[in-house]
Amino acid sequence: MIDNVILGFQTALTPQNLLWCFVGVLAGTVIGLLPGLGSTTGVAVLLPLTLDFEPVTALIMLAGIYYGAQYGGTITSVLISTPGEASSVVTTLDGYQMARRGRAGAALSIAAIGSFVAAIFSLVLLMVVAPPFADFALKFGPVENLAIMILGLATIVSFSGDSRIRGFAMAAAGLLLATVGLDAGTGTSRFTFDSVNLLSGVPFVEVMIGLFAVGEVMYQIRIGAAAPIRTRFRDLLITRNELRRSVGPIGRGSVLGFLLGCLPGAGSTLASFIAYGVEKRVSRNKGQLGQGAIEGVASPESANNAAANANFVPTLTLGIPGGGTTAVLLGAFTIYGLQPGPLLFQNQPTLVWGLLVSFFIGNVMLLVLNLPMAPMFAQMLRIPYAYLYPIILFTSFVGAYSIDNNMFSVWVVFVSGVAGYFMKLYDLPMAPLVLGLVIGPLFEKALTQTSALGDGDLLIVLSHPIALVVLALAVLLVAGPALARLLPRNTPAEEREPAGV
Amino acid sequence: MSTLARIRGNGEATAYAALAVVGLAAAAGGIYYGVFVDGGRVGPGFLPVLAGGLTAVLCGWIALRSVHGQPSHRPGGAAAGAGPHAAEGTDLMESGADDDVDISGRTRRERIRNLWKVFGLTLGAILLVQVVGFLAAFGGLVFVISTWVERQALLKSAVIAAVATGLIYGAFGLFLHVPLPGGLLGVGTEG
Amino acid sequence: MKRNSLLLTAVVAASVLILTACGEAKGQKSAGGDGETFKPKGNVTMVVPYGAGGGSDMSGRSIAAGLEAVVPGLRINTENRVGGSGAVGYSYFLSKTGDPNYLLPSETALLALPLNTKVGFDYTRFTPIMKVGDDFTLAVVPASSPWTTCADLVNASKSGRVVAGISGVTGLDNVVFTLTEQATGAKFDRVPFESGDELLAALLGNQIQVASLNPGEVVEQLKAGKLKALCAFSEKRYEYPELKDIPTAKEQGIDVAFAQFRGLIAPGGISDGARKFWIDASRKFIESDKARQYIASNYLQPNALFGDDFTAYLKENNDTLKKAQGE
């Protein structure tokens, strides 16, 4: 183990690998800043540039892009309410509210710190206990996944405050939207109106850009220009109190994120939503969550980063990708003539340990880069909105186009933008809609598979203990307040939470 | 006043009612696709029926509740609403008057006009992509919004639009090799 | 003296070579006047109908790089036109009909898409150039499985429930299971997944009993002893050392062989000269190290076909698919 780590440092600390690690995290941050471009697209698009590199160097750089993009995506979520990928949708809830109140610097700092702590935590676990975790992850078949998806959907209760019913209505609408396209089970094309563009469903990144970025721009025009957010430099820094409040959320987010990230397919989106849902239940400041509480940024950001790293558990130990980006990275392995699989740790120790150590170094670089940059990025909000919003529109549409190089994406953004405006106007919560849209296909797949495994009988769930435990957690999450009401503790009347997110 | 008329008079209720109708239609579509296949297995219509049905029931209920005197949120009326959205909430409701002016001195009516201008201009830019190319269409959009809608200085707006277009060309066209449509002018990175 | 003669021979040989080359160049030029030969003007675009980093993308980029290496002066840009399970990319390619500056790395989706969904194209709307190789599937089971041959599998399915994972109803692995059922009277209970990786996880976790996967997807699991292969659904055994001991289904009395192909197509309606240019370039490509490397790292069987032979193969393959999916 120690030998391996030393071997890893020897590999990762060569000037060449350090340089490309830096280039990777920098490029990743920039890509994450561009709307629509998340880590998956970033890695895939820059993959061809690395073809002439040494395999270790290439993979180090690609991994740098991977977690650099996670940091970058957070910045736009906080500043202009434009999540780069689904896993930072939750961050917009409190992060954007913080930015509106002049606390963007603090939000960005805590996201960087939380991500860093989560990354280091999950990397240590990845090095020490990856194989047993991978074996455990394999126990999660369709039935267990179905339970996890239900747990994910149950977190909706956290997003809509006292108008919970609106949250569920929007989640149902999101699930419905997710059924557009080819059905995985039978290959039936549903609600496609003979358009080839709809065969693969309604693309959620485009919907997200439309709802959040374009919808927000339109809404701001409607409610009128506010004074530019002016902040003194001191306000840009995170306070001691905010740091103290974030310790718990970062810890919980990291653990949850790691556990969910180990499962192939569940991924960081679910991790961020569930972490937020948990915070909403257990946090001391739960009443403020949704109105710009620092816990609402710290927890999902830690969770999605821990999950992003934990995705490497099945990837490196089994050769099965943990998520979209690791799938592309596995493809890259093949290009470099490496066969990813259960023997990778044995056959390629230099590569694997060099890569793992470079994760550490890359995350340190990101923290060093991002902490001073957070206040600087926050200054962006001082640009007069009259100039800022047309540029937000431009980058949103060009970012959407670049996902598939298809004008269809641009139209999806436009239509979702109109929808997003009206949703904001009538205070319909958007996060549940996105959650429904993202989880919908996974939920349906797990449902179809479970039903096929049980030959039509969904009650086989009852014979799977892990699934039962997860379902019990879901019940706890939904019925938590009802149970809490039975307790005599008199919580102060919670501030009414605006449902608009 | 009939329920239907009341829904039509209430923007929020109309939105929910429309969603409920979509949900109902989708549930019907789901039955057509087949809720179960192969003797009891979940089929392609299962989730459409489930999600569509839920959408219809929940949204229908909210729509009805909001027209029958029981606002589904902001209890106590919009004006009394607390939190950061309170002021905006007032503005959203019909009670908002024309003397509600933002810091640029624009009335509510002006702002709504601006909103539709931006919607229209964006739509126009998307349609123009095939003609003048992606960069020109959206660079133009930035310029036109700044000058015509936001009444900013011509030169400054032109410089900002040009710089933004240049940066986007650099990031997406040169760095990421995105094939941006060039339109008839051929100013793009396609092909 | 001896040295001089050697030199002389070399000079003569060189002159002959040069002269021949000139002659050829001249011939080409004159032919060019009749519109007989073709050389792409400007950059060529390789349209990949799937996302960057996937199998189709790698195949597209490998072929593009390989063609650039064997045709001096050729520049090929790769563009991913993603959506609709590949249908968007093929539809975009259809819109380039008559333009010889476009290429597309094709695979069996070219046949499967039009058979299963309403799309505006089928294989006859394009110009088949080259089939690079065949990707057959192996029947794989967890290492703890009691079965050792595909015959065991078929027999087990006749007496009890066999849960087979498939990568979607339109997946090519499902075609193999259907063909096996048709050939032997076996019956598989299918659970739909969405990719080879998901099937792999389900096999390793014992959620399903058997899957039919490409060698490239499972070879490492086989080496590690986590999975075992029962048979290969191919005409002949693989020659790769790590696969050569796997018997074919035919050897075990099951007459089923079905491959996904990997190939290259050009838009329909291009001139004969353009078609000939791409076929000639492809012939050179297939001899190159780049091609060999691509085929080996993906464990393909290198059964290259060009032009009309490829078209005939597509027709036959299409009929098999129709038979398997039509019933």
Image (cartoon, coloured by chain):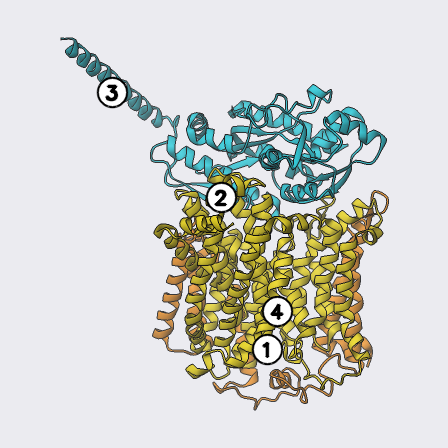
Confirm whether circles 4 and 2 share one chain: yes
Q: Quadrant of the C terminus of chain A?
A: bottom right
**1 or 3: mark nearer the eye:** 1
- Which colour denotes chain B? orange
Q: Amino acid at mark 1?
A: Ala
Q: Is residue A222 above or below residue C249?
A: below
> How far apart, in angstroms, are the residues tagged by discs 4 and 3?
69 Å
Q: Amino acid at mark 4?
A: Gly
Residue C159 in percent (x, y) is at 85, 30
In the structure shown, which secondary structural element does the residue marked by tag 1 occupy? loop
- Which colour denotes chain A? yellow
Q: Is residue A191 left or right of residue C269?
A: right
In the structure shown, which secondary structural element does the residue marked by tag 4 occupy? helix
Q: To which residue does mark 4 refer?
A: A420
> How far apart, in angstroms, are the residues tagged by discs 1 and 3?
78 Å
Question: Which label's residue is closer to the chain start, 4 or 2?
Answer: 2
